[in-house]
Image (cartoon, grey):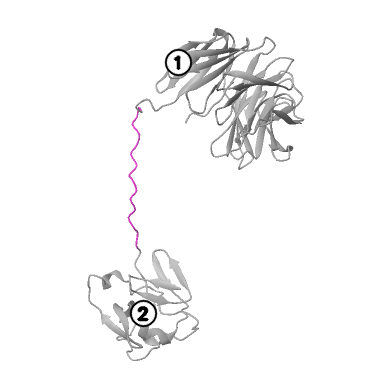
């Protein structure tokens, strides 16, 4: 092992220990035949004072005890209680002429016990940390703050709300009874489902509806999901004749419909977009479809479900269900479709969202006006009542 004190200083030893800013060499396994090849220097404590040492042939030699640009004795601690040359040592000179080391501390091959040690002073390197500047009491608002889109079901509107300052920027008329809204990955277009047989396309640059896709009268659009690549949208129909309508976003047309559970409501895509999971508050199962082939993969025996959240890797699914009282979140292994565990939350849980770090799940409990936070690292649930007449529905992380 090679240890450097400077650009040319080397120790050939078997062990090096670090201790709070000091480099401590110990239990050295040294080859005394190499002293004449030693190219650098080391420091030893001689008479309680530091000395710069080197070799002349195989003999250790004092080079200097005076400060120089590369060596400052004041920077070395010769009073350290663990040093062989601590304060009150009687050594007055280094025993020149013997390769056995200072004051009898042997430098023999495979020596055991404490070897000669040099102690550096504690050194704290100044790092280029930027000083913390406290935020202003009232943060300034600019265009970088995100907007929020909200459907107003009873007024056939979509409102665009700025978050700083918090105010309605514009109200956009859509087909009656709008339900859900989603934005394409490029951020250019918002899709809005309207229960009265329509899907609305809103240009977010102009805040205007640029296209309205009217569906068959038997389809009542509710749930909505957009593929990660922005090529397709999936619409659920909330009636007894449950279907999923697949929309090609290039042509803005329905390309196929897939039969599914009655009153299909929630649609959630896996993180890679390979599957879409379908929930229903009145259905007896969760349907799972392959988005490449548009075929049903399986159904999960979980009833009265509203929403699904996935972890970032897509290995776990978290399904809200009102089949228990109070409600619960069922955890599913997505490779085996087996239930792993469940968490008890509030009454009638609906929307669920995973935090960015995959540690927390946030659940809206619509039946009792509360929010549950599940700590997945601790396996703990904290449910907080909102008070008043609050019945939470809809959830999103603003970033």
Between 160 and 379, the one nearer to me in the picture: 160
Q: Residue at x 23, y 70 (%)?
A: 69
Q: Residue at x 58, y 29 (%)?
A: 227
Q: Which residues are magenta?
A: 123-138
Q: Is residue 243 visible?
A: yes
Does the magenta run of residues contain 127? yes
Q: Residue at x 54, y 8 (%)?
A: 155
The kind of secondary structure the magenta stretch mainly shows is: loop
Between 343 and 154, the one nearer to me in the picture: 154
Q: SS for tag 2?
A: loop
At which x and y percent is residue 106?
43, 86
Quadrant hosting residue 372: top right
Reading the chain from its start, which is encountered first: label 2 or label 1? Answer: 2
Residue behind mark 1: 207
Does the magenta run of residues contain 387? no
Quadrant hosting residue 178: top right
Residue 88 appears left or right of 207: left
Check disc 2: other Cα within 10 Å, few if <14, some if 14-19, many if 20+: many
> Rounded to the nearest whole Å, what is the CA distance between mark 2 and mark 1?
81 Å
Q: Tell me if label 2 and label 1 are in contact, CB under 8 Å.
A: no
């Amino acid at each position: 092992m090679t240890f450097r004190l400077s650009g040319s200083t080397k120790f050939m030893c078997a062990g090096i220990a670090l201790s709070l800013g000091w480099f401590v060499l110990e239990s050295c396994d040294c080859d005394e035949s190499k002293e004449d090849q030693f190219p650098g220097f080391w420091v030893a404590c001689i008479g309680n004072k530091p000395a710069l040492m080197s070799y002349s042939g195989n003999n250790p030699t004092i080079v200097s005890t005076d400060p120089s640009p590369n060596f400052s004795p004041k920077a070395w601690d010769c009073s350290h209680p663990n040093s062989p040359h601590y304060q009150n040592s009687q050594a007055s000179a280094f025993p020149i002429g013997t390769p056995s080391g200072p004051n009898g501390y042997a430098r023999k091959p495979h020596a055991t016990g404490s070897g000669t040690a040099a102690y550096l002073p504690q050194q704290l390197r100044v790092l280029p940390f930027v000083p913390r500047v406290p935020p202003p009491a009232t943060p300034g608002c600019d265009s970088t703050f995100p907007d929020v889109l909200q459907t107003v079901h009873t007024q056939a509107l979509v409102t665009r709300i700025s978050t700083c300052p918090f105010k309605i920027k514009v109200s956009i008329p859509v087909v009656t009874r709008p339900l859900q809204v989603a934005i394409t990955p490029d951020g250019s277009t918002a899709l809005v489902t309207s229960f009265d047989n329509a899907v609305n396309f809103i240009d977010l640059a102009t805040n205007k509806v640029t296209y309205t896709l009217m569906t068959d009268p038997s389809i009542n659009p509710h749930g909505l999901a957009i593929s990660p690549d922005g090529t397709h949208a999936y619409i659920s129909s909330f009636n007894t004749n449950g279907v999923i309508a697949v929309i090609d976003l290039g042509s803005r047309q329905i390309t196929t419909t897939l039969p599914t559970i009655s009153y299909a409501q929630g649609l959630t895509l896996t993180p890679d977009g390979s599957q879409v999971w379908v929930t229903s508050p009145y259905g007896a199962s969760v349907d799972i479809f392959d988005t490449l082939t548009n075929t049903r993969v399986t159904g999960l025996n979980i009833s009265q479900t509203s929403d699904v959240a996935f972890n970032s890797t897509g290995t776990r699914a978290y399904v809200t269900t009102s089949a228990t009282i109070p409600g619960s979140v069922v955890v599913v292994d997505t490779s085996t479709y087996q239930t792993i565990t469940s968490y008890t939350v509030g009454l009638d849980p609906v929307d669920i969202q995973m935090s960015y770090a995959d540690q927390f799940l946030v659940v809206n409990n619509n039946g009792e006006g509360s929010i549950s936070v599940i700590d997945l690292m601790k396996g703990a649930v904290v449910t907080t009542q909102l008070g008043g007449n609050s019945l939470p529905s809809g959830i999103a992380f603003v970033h």
